Amino acid sequence: MTTATPSLPLFVLGRGSDPESERGVDCPGSLPPASDPDLVRRAAAAKATLGDRLFVLGHHYQRDEVIAFADVTGDSFKLAREAAARPDAEYIVFCGVHFMAESADILTTDAQQVVLPDLAAGCSMADMARLAQVEDAWDALVDAGLDQDTIPVTYMNSSADIKAFCGRHGGVVCTSSNARRVLEWAYARGRRVLFLPDQHLGRNTAVLQLGLDLDDCVVWDPRRTDGGLTTEQLTAATMVLWRGHCSVHGRFTAEAVADVRARIPGVQVLVHPECQHEVVTAADQVGSTEFIISAIENAPAGSAWAVGTELNLVQRLAKEHPEQQIVFLEKTVCYCATMNRIDLPHLVWALEELVAGRVPNRIVVDPQTAAEARAALQRMLDLPG
Ligand code: 13P
Ligand code: SF4
């Protein structure tokens, strides 16, 4: 029997210190004030001074003021590939969240240094699966004699030690743009998947793309003894979903889909697969941030879209495509608080530190964890397509 592992205690974002979790730590430096009218010039000057020694990656959910300085923008899959493809850049400044910077460190050479401009840019979803909890779940599968035909699959949005766990147990990483292909890979190797940490991406991909039934899926709740599941339920399941979710995408509702359809005739509802199953099934299209962007870029002028993903991206799309009507799906959903931690003052501070010869907020994954996590990441990167 496994006992429930307690959840992480709360602390105010950006205050307090917990380098072991995705919640990050305080910024150690003195930041320029956000009101400094010189910030754009300072960022541009520091970037020019660093030249080819620097490569700045920007996730699509970053603020416009930060995206303006990104050498490349992308979803987490594209950014992982881009980081791996720049062995000449001495410094990789990652404008995104902590698990992305960890993946960049794992995929780059030892000579390269990855910087996260604000260490408080973590991810609440990644924090919902901690290694001790995942090991407890795995022990339950071992005790039930099920581990040999179970493949652990973790979403990119997880800490490096969870990716390493998957690497150790013959598993793999996926992102929202390749979850289907990765699950096909996994089911070719085992009859059951343990999917970490986003239950919604796991369920949506299994049911809507691979044709599994909702009844084939069970949810392992790390806060309950034995995950809240019987051995019979674990044995029968082909998809064991971790009870985790995105605190942004998990808040879109099927009512908002019905509401926007009533308000905007002919609107197309386009959502990210981190949304709840009932939202995804009510929508017209579902896909990763890269998919959402290309759906809108390729749509004819005059089309109307209600988009269920992070607000920075939706606002940017609306600004870039005035020929279309683009609205945010849900009135009460906010920006991703941790993505928004990276702002221009933090970026300026990080770049100026690099110019001064100091490497701030370096993200380093220990060699053993990195090697095992790399195995799981590499299995994903080696898949065709
Ligand atoms: P993608 O970048 O895979 O679309 O994931 C979205 C997300 O929530 C990143 O934090
Ligand atoms: Fe994490 Fe969701 Fe924010 Fe992405 S959008 S960083 S999954 S909380």
Image (cartoon, helix red, strand yellow):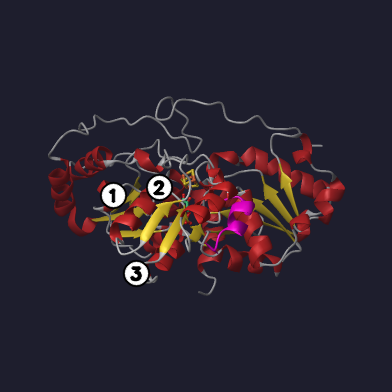
Q: Name the element at disc 1.
A: helix
Residue positioned 59% across, 55% down in the render: 201
Q: Which sits earlier in the primary sequence, circle 3 or circle 1?
A: 1
Residue 342's x, y, as percent?
33, 41
Q: Assign the N terminus to one quadrant of the image.
A: top right
Q: In the picture shown, does residue 71 fall above or below 233? A: below
Q: Nearer the viewer, mark 3 or mark 1?
A: 3
Q: Which sits earlier in the primary sequence, circle 2 or circle 1?
A: 1
Residue that label 3 marks: 301
Confirm or reject: label 3 Cβ below 8 Å from ligand 1. Answer: no
Q: Nearer the viewer, residue 17 or 65?
A: 65
In the picture provided, is 331 more to the left or to the right than 34? right
Residue that label 1 marks: 64
Q: Which sits earlier in the primary sequence, circle 2 or circle 3?
A: 3
Q: Check if mark 2's residue and mark 3's residue have beta carbons within 8 Å.
A: no
Q: Nearer the viewer, mark 2 or mark 3?
A: 3
Q: Check if mark 3's residue and mark 1's residue have beta carbons within 8 Å.
A: no
Q: Name the element at disc 3.
A: loop
- Magenta span of residues: 274-285
Kindly identify the amino acid type of the residue bearing the numbered disc 3.
Answer: Ala
- Specify whether residue 4 is painted magenta: no
Q: CA distance from mark 2 to mark 3?
A: 22 Å
Crowd rating for badge 3 (residues with CA inside 10 Å; few <14, some 14–19, many 20+): few
In the picture provided, is 129 more to the left or to the right than 268? right
Residue that label 2 marks: 311
